[in-house]
Amino acid sequence: MLVAGYFTASKWAIHHTTLTFFDLLRSDRPVAVDVAVRRDRDWQATAEMITLPVAILNHGNTVKFTEYSFLANILAARGYMVVSIQHDLDSDEPMVTNVGEEYAGRRMQYNRGIANIMFAIDELKKVQPNADWKHLTMIGHSNGGDISMYFAKHYPEMIKKVVTLDNLRVPFATDGKFKILSFRSHDPVFKADPGVVPDDDICAKAGITVVRTGYQHTDMSDRGPDEVKQQIGGILDKFLDDDDNGAAAARTDTPKPTGAPSALALSAASASKN
């Protein structure tokens, strides 16, 4: 019921803003982001009343950054500023799988993902400085889950939590510096590489929660069945409850908007004029 309430609330309480930034250092590479945030929380942050927690959402291969709204809305309803980043462009070389190589030869895509995330953060700091850009929740599906884990292992000081949906290549961090939740598919085609998912004993010591499901790998986006999305959402919500009690309380104690325009509204309006 709670998750269903999030989907209903998203129609009136959460707004999505799409912005495109151009990275001069990478030949003006466009980096599109969809930012989902609760209107009242955005207003409060703009008025410097609160600091927004931030979640970075990373899409899977061949799936668009806008196709994870079921996750973005759950996080936004809790009070997060959710940043979904488009990592791949049509002009990029196709991603290939080189069996036997480290990460199946995908380090280039992971490094590009890190560059996209860092660039998007730098640009969004100008839009909404009153967000916690130093303690991120990273979330990602498939290749996006690998980008999330790869980023977290290289920048653990910036990470609060990591959530992956069937990442297949990058082994989990096991040093216990941040909590990890991972949903695993039961799919005859998509199999994690050896050593990616630790055994149960290591998971217990490192604060890693592994949820083994009967879902298909490709079900874990907006394209999947509603039942799968609702079940994932419910488990994710419980996982976030551990550290987000304040944000959870905000769901039932929502202050009225001040009437001041939000930072994202102003940014979107400026972009439309340009």
Image: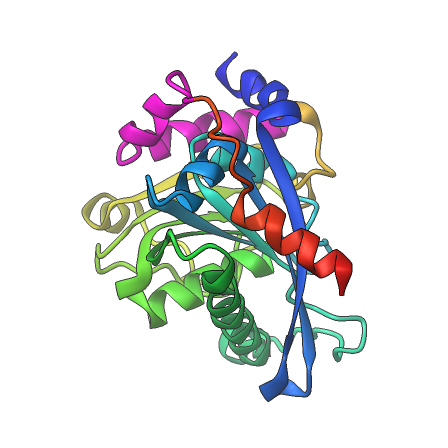
Name the foreground residue: 250 vs 245. Answer: 250
Is 91 placed left or right of 159 in the picture?
Answer: right
Q: Which residues are magenta?
A: 228-255
Residue 5: x and y in percent read: 55, 16
Query: In which quadrant of the rendered image does the C terminus lie?
Result: bottom right
Instruction: Write the residue at 75% across / 71% down.
Output: 89
Magenta segment main secondary structure: helix
| Vertical relation: 182 (above or below) 93 | above
Question: Which percent across, then down, holds residue 129?
Answer: 41, 57
Q: Is residue 112 magenta?
A: no
Residue 2: x and y in percent read 49, 16
Q: Horizontal placement of 152 versus 234: left or right?
A: left
Residue found at x 33% / y 69%: 155
Residue at 33% of width from left, 39% of height from top?
Answer: 49
Q: Looking at this rendering, what residue extends furthest in the right direction?
A: 90
Percent x, y of residue 157? 26, 64
